[in-house]
Image (cartoon, grey):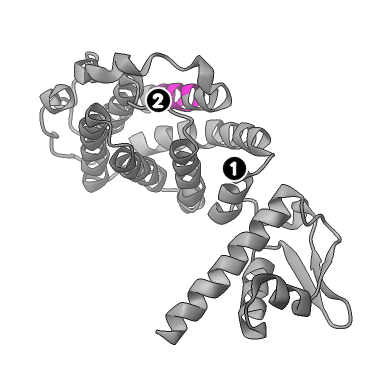
Amino acid sequence: MVRDSQAGLHGSVVDRLGVQITSGAAPAGEVLRIEQLEARFGVSRSVVREAIRVLESMGMVTSRRRVGITVAPRHCWNLFDPQIIAWRLDGPGRGEQLRELGELRRGLEPVAAHLAALRATPAQCGTLTGAVMQMAVHGKSGDLEAYLEADVLFHRTLLEASGNEMMGALSGVVAAVLAGRTHHHLMPARPEPAAIRWHAEVAQAVQAGDAAAAERAMRDIVDEATRAMLDPADASDPSDAADLSGASGGTDLSGASGPSGAAPPPPPSILGS
C-alpha cells in the first residue's frame, strides 16, 4: 500500500511538472531546486527525485551536480512519448500539436495501410473487421469511450499489420491522438457514418490485398480527422450519425479472402444494426 501511495505521489508530481514545462510556465533553461519542489508539492525528497528521473527519461530535464535540475529545450524532448503529447494537447500549444500530429499521421498511416494489405495475417484481418463493427455499434449508441477503445484497436492493429516494427512502435502516438480528440471534445457526439465507412473500406481492402484502395481509404480517414480537429466548428451535424446504416456504404466486408487466406468476417449488416 505504501508503494502504491508513493507511485501515485510521484506520478502526480510528474504530471504537474510536465504540464508546467510543456505549457512554457517552466521555460527551457529554468533551474528547479529539489528543496523548492518538495515544498511546492508537499512531498518527500525521494518522491521528487523519482519524478525527476521520469522527466529525465523523457528528455524534458537534465540533472547535474552543483547546477540542479534544468528544464531542457523542446528539441531535446521525446516528442513521441504519449504523455508529452497529452500534456501538449492540454496546453496553449494545442493547435500546433494537432497540426504536427495530423501531418505525421498523413505520412504514416496510409503507407501502413498499403503495407498491411500486402502483409496482414488472417488474425489481423479479423481484428480489423471486428474493430470496425464495434465502432459502428458504439458510434450508434453514442458511447464515445467504447468507440475510442475500438478505434485505437483498429489503428494499432493496422500499424502492426504493416509488418514494419518501427511503424508498429508508433501506435502509442496514434492512440494518444485519438484519445486527445475524444477527451478534448474535438469530435461529434456521435461519430460520422463516413468515418466508419472509411474504416470498413480499409478493413476490406486489407483483407482483399488491395494496397492502393487501403492507402486511399486511410488517407481519407486521416485527412478528415485532421480537418475536424483543427476546425471542430466545421464538423457536420452529429445528428446525421443517427443512422449508421450508411456505414456499410456499399462496402462488402463479407467479400474476398485476405492476402493470407483470412476467413470472411461476419456480414456487413452488423454495421447497420
Tell me which amino acid carries mark 2.
Pro
Mark 2, Cα crowd under 10 Å, few <14 / some 14-19 / many 20+, is many
Residue 249 x, y percent position in the rendering = 24, 14
Q: Main secondary structure of the magenta part?
A: helix
Q: Residue under circle 2? A: 188
Of the numbered discs 2 and 1, the one sitting upstream in the chain is: 1
How many numbered callouts? 2
Q: Residue at x 52, y 23 (%)?
A: 232
Q: Which residues are magenta?
A: 215-224
Q: Residue under circle 1? A: 89
Q: Quadrant of residue 143?
A: top left
* Dot 1: element: helix
Q: Residue at x 32, y 45 (%)?
A: 149
In the depicted structure, whether residue 30 falls above or below residue 54: above
Q: Residue at x 20, y 32 (%)?
A: 137
* Front-lying residue, 99 or 145: 145
* Front-lying residue, 49 or 166: 49
Q: Looking at the rendering, in which quadrant would you find the C terminus?
A: top left
Tell me which amino acid carries mark 1.
Leu
